[in-house]
Image (spheres, rainbow, N blue to C red):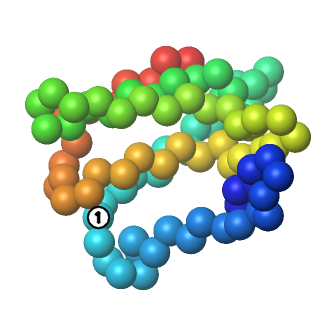
């Protein structure tokens, strides 16, 4: 759901799964007792020898907003990733 200033809210719908296009990986981090949702952790995924994607686990994305804590990374036609690094 997107809500911009002075505009009506609208919904983006990702249809890549229904259309069977592209590859992705979802990462769910499970933290310690003091930080069970792993807020602040960063995930870095390296692929195709030189490309990198980075995601940070947070529960907000802006003023009065929230988001799920799972991190999603899209890879298009890439068939394999080289490595996953997690900084707790």
Which one is in front, 65 or 5?
5
Q: Is residue 8 above or below residue 71?
A: below
Res 28 quadrant in image: top right
Q: Nearer the viewer, residue 66 or 62?
A: 62
Q: Position of residue 27 (x, y in %)?
A: 49, 44
Residue found at the far bottom of this picture = 18
Please state which of residues 1 and 87 is positioned toward the viewer in this rendering. Answer: 1
Determine whether, in the image, residue 64 is placed left or right of residue 16: right
According to the image, label 1 marks what residue? 22
User: Where 39 sits versus 71, above or below?
Assistant: above
Residue occupying image coordinates x 68% and y 32%: 58
Percent coordinates x, y for residue 74 in the rendering: 36, 51
**Residue 8 on image: x %, y %:** 79, 64
Q: Residue at x 45, y 24 (%)?
A: 86
| Along the line of sight, the residue nearer the viewer: 16 or 88 | 16
The residue depicted at 29 percent of the width and 51 percent of the height is 75
């Amino acid at each position: 759901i997107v809500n911009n200033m002075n505009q009506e809210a609208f919904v983006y719908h990702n249809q890549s799964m229904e259309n069977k296009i592209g590859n992705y990986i979802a990462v769910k981090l499970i933290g310690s007792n003091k930080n069970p949702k792993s807020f602040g952790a960063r995930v870095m995924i390296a692929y195709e020898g030189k490309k990198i994607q980075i995601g940070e686990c947070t529960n907000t994305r802006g003023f009065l907003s929230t988001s799920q804590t799972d991190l999603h990374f899209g890879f298009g036609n890439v068939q394999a990733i080289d490595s996953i690094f997690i900084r707790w």
